[in-house]
């Protein structure tokens, strides 16, 4: 199989910046190399408005550091092209999805993940699905983690596994892959998970050159996860 | 001295995504904590147009992976508010500054760095200046590195020290600080440098909580730099 060409990243209000930017940086570095210059990215959100890491509010009273950071979408949930790979970052925006003051409806993003993964609407199914941090919440709610061994951020370990009771949640995992689903631990772990995914397709030498360009001090082993212990996370097996 | 409140990041076309997003993520995590919620960020560019990690061209033939990633400025070089801290990322855009096909003029950014650091135009001088990767090229051209011990990415070691002949360029350095100037090595090193800067002001415990939230596998020592050896970089002392 040739290397995937069509990448998508799902951005919702209050996504976590590094959850998105870390994996994208690894992919940018790869996309500059000969043989990978036909990689393309779609930045997908509910609307074409800038997507803020903060509140994205016009209320001047809600003015935080994160509010200033806004990325531009290239496509909406409705106009996104067929994708080979979808990256789903975490962020406060997907923790707050039950709250009425969330300006966008995360359920629409959950639906997008489900449809993209399964290939509904006459689409091809995704070749790979990658979640970072609590982006796994959207995957769990979409039902695509059922029957898989998965992981997520250790910082919200009490909150996330109950959303996916048919999955085995692995505590000590910088990342884990099961079939074509790669779930990673919190924030920075998204880079190590993406590099491991990349290595499974393009081999060690190419990934090493990406790592060197990024000057990334890499966790090469999936179980190199000091944060499971920091947050006291334990495995959560599926409910019978 | 109280913790700085007014942060700026300088974005020019073809900046390196993680050079910007890494330090910002560390600052976002800090800004959510009690005692730091009054931190504010200005995203500064030449114009208010979205700033692309790629070519930012309307030419459909120039369509790369990185082109899809565009951040929104909050201020221009002319409208930026007084700053306590300025972060200057690297990127291809500041390597290409001599090329005629660069759509924006990097010299304007160099002037901004000089004026901000020195406090010209009736401004207060910066309290801290942080460069990531080859962002140090802009600082060197601005003359603000003269007489300082500094570092930059090891991947472009042959290119950058000649731009700052009055500085001592340290090869084995994940980051280095000299007076109020913190220069870091390539891309990911910006996070470790920013965390070290933060720790110098707020102490270890607070930074450790940021590191845990980010699940960042941290280089705590400034000389923990495996990439100096990878790229064969050697110290470059100042020219007599």
Image (cartoon, coloured by chain):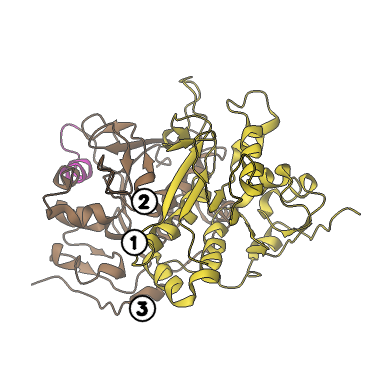
Chain colours: A brown, B yellow
Residue B157 placement (x, y as % from top left): 73, 51
Q: Residue at x 42, y 60 (%)?
A: A188
Q: Is residue B111 left or right of residue B85?
A: right
Specify the quadrant of the image occupied by residue A229: bottom left
Disc 1 chain ID:
B
The span shown in magenta is A111-122
Residue at the spot of label 1? B32
Spatial CA span between label 2 and label 1: 9 Å
- Nearest the camera: B151 or A237? B151
Residue at the spot of label 2? A66
Q: Residue at x 38, y 61 (%)?
A: B29
Q: Residue at x 48, y 71 (%)?
A: B202
Q: Is residue A3 above or below residue A163?
A: above
Residue A112 counted in the magenta span? yes
- Nearest the camera: B61 or B164? B164
Residue A194 placement (x, y as % from top left): 41, 54
Determine whether the residue tagged by mark 3 lies in a helix, strand or loop: helix
Q: Is residue A177 above or below residue A24?
A: below
Task: Say if mark 3 contacts mark 1, CB within 8 Å.
Answer: no
Spatial CA span between label 3 and label 2: 26 Å
Determine whether the residue tagged by mark 1 lies in a helix, strand or loop: loop
Q: Which mark is residue A230?
A: 3
Q: Would residue B84 be visible to someone looking at this image? A: yes
């Amino acid at each position: 199989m040739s290397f995937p060409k069509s990448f998508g990243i799902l951005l919702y209000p209050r996504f976590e910046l590094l959850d998105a930017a870390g994996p994208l940086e690894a992919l940018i570095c790869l996309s500059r190399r000969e043989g990978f210059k036909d990689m393309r990215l779609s930045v997908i959100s509910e609307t074409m408005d800038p997507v803020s890491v903060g509140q994205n509010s016009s209320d001047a009273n809600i003015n935080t550091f994160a509010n200033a950071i806004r990325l531009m979408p290239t496509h909406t949930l409705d106009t996104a092209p067929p994708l080979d790979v979808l990256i789903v970052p975490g962020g406060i925006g997907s923790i707050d999805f039950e709250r009425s003051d969330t300006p966008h409806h995360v359920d629409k993003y959950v639906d997008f993940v489900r449809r993209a993964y399964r290939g509904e609407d006459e689409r091809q199914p995704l070749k790979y699905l990658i979640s970072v941090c609590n982006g796994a919440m959207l995957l769990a709610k979409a039902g695509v983690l059922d029957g898989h061994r998965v992981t997520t951020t250790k910082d919200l370990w009490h909150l996330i596994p109950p959303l996916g009771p048919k999955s085995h949640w692995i505590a000590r995992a910088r990342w884990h892959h099961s079939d074509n689903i790669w779930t990673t631990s919190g924030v920075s772990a998204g880079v190590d998970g993406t590099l491991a995914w990349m290595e499974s397709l393009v081999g060690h030498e190419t990934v090493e050159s990406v790592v060197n360009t990024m000057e990334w001090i890499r966790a090469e082993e999936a179980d190199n996860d000091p944060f499971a212990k920091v947050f006291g996370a334990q495995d959560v097996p599926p409910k019978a």
